[in-house]
Image: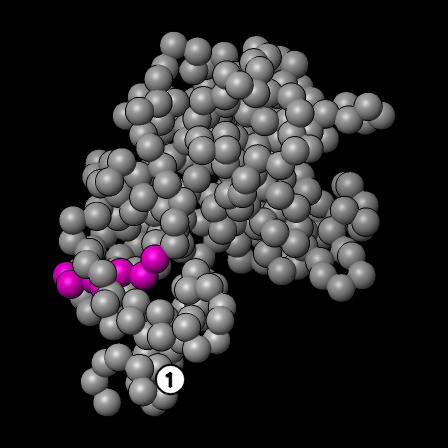
Amino acid sequence: MNKLQEFLAIINSKIGAGYVYGGQSGQPLTKEALAKLVNTFGRSKYYYSNYSAEKWIGYQYFDCSGLIVYTLRRMGLIPAVADYSAQSIYSVLCRPVNRSQLRPGDLCFKNTDNSGIVHCGVYTGDNRITHARGTFYGVVNTQVFDTFNSFGRLKYFSEDYNDTKISFEEAVKTVPAATTIYDLPDETSAAVGRLEAGGTANIQAVLNGSWYMVPLKGKSGYIKIKPLTDNEELIGALEFISQKSGIDKNYWYKQAMNVKWLDVCFIKIAQGFGGPGKK
C-alpha cells in the first residue's frame, strides 16, 4: 500500500463519523469538548432549530478540512500541530487540476465569490467524494455535487498511483466464521473489531474485489471478502418486500443495516406474508 492508497483508506474509514465544526483530533466527542468548541467558535456553529452537534457525542468528529488535516497528521506528512483551513489546504498543500483530470485522492473544493473556499472533500473515483458534509450528515460518501468547482492534487502524492478500485454498494452478507475487522485494508493494520460466526455483515463498499468496507460506530473498518457469503435468506426477503411495497430493495438494505435485529424482522415479515424461507 503506497501513501496515496493509505490516505484514501484512512479517509474512507471515517465514513460514519460525525461533523462538528473545528473537529480534527479523531477522538470521540464529549460534552466537555463540545462546550469548549462552543466557547471558541460560538453557539450558532453547533445548535440549530431542530438538531445539534450533540447528536455526535460518543463519535469521532471532524469538519471538512479537519478530516484531511487529521489524516495528513496521522500519516506524518504534516506536523502534529499543523492546522489548515479548506482555503489553505488548496492554496498551500495542493496544485490545481481540472475536473477532467481528477483521480482518486484528489481534493474537491467549493469556491465562492464572496467567501473563497468554504468546503472540501476527497475524490474517490466514479464521480464520488468522501467529505464531512455538515452537522446533519456527518462524514459521508456522495456524488460530486455541481457546487464543487475547484480541484487540487496534494503535493505529497504527485508521484503515487492509486490502483485500488472502490465501489460503493450496499449489501448484507453472512459471516460463516469469526472475522477480524481491520483499521485499513491490510492484515498488518490494527484490529478494530470482530464479526462473530453466524452473524451478518453490512457492506458499504468493495475494494478491488478483495476487501469489504463495513460500518462501525463512528467510523468504518475493513474485512477480507473471502470468509463472507451472501445472506440468501435476507436477500430473498428484501426482494419480496420490495415487490410488495414498490420501494427499491436498496432502501430496505439501508434500514436493515442501521437498526439492530431489523434484518431478522424483515425475514419474518416476508415469511408471514407468503415470501421465501422456512415458516
The secondary element bearing badge 1 is classed as helix
Residue under the point 49% across and 51% down: 16
Question: Is residue 175 found inside the magenta-colored segment of the image?
Answer: yes
Instruction: Out of 72 and 268, give the one closest to the viewer.
Output: 268
Tag 1: Cα neighbours inside 10 Å, few (<14), some, or many (≥20)? some
The location of residue 234, given as percent across then percent down, is 30, 71
Q: For residue 191, say whether it is visible.
A: no
Q: For residue 225, say whether it is visible.
A: yes
- For the C terminus, the quadrant is bottom left
The residue that disc 1 covers is 269
Question: Is residue 108 found inside the magenta-colored segment of the image?
Answer: no
Instruction: Out of 255 and 83, give the one closest to the viewer.
Output: 255
The location of residue 271, given as percent across then percent down, is 31, 85
Colour scheme employed for the rendering of this structure: one colour
- For the N terminus, the quadrant is top left
Instruction: Out of 252 and 41, give the one closest to the viewer.
Output: 252
Specify whether 182 is left or right of 50.
left
Instruction: Out of 141 and 18, give the one closest to the viewer.
Output: 141
Specify whether 46 is left or right of 101.
right
Residue under the point 41% across and 35% down: 10
- The magenta segment is 171-177
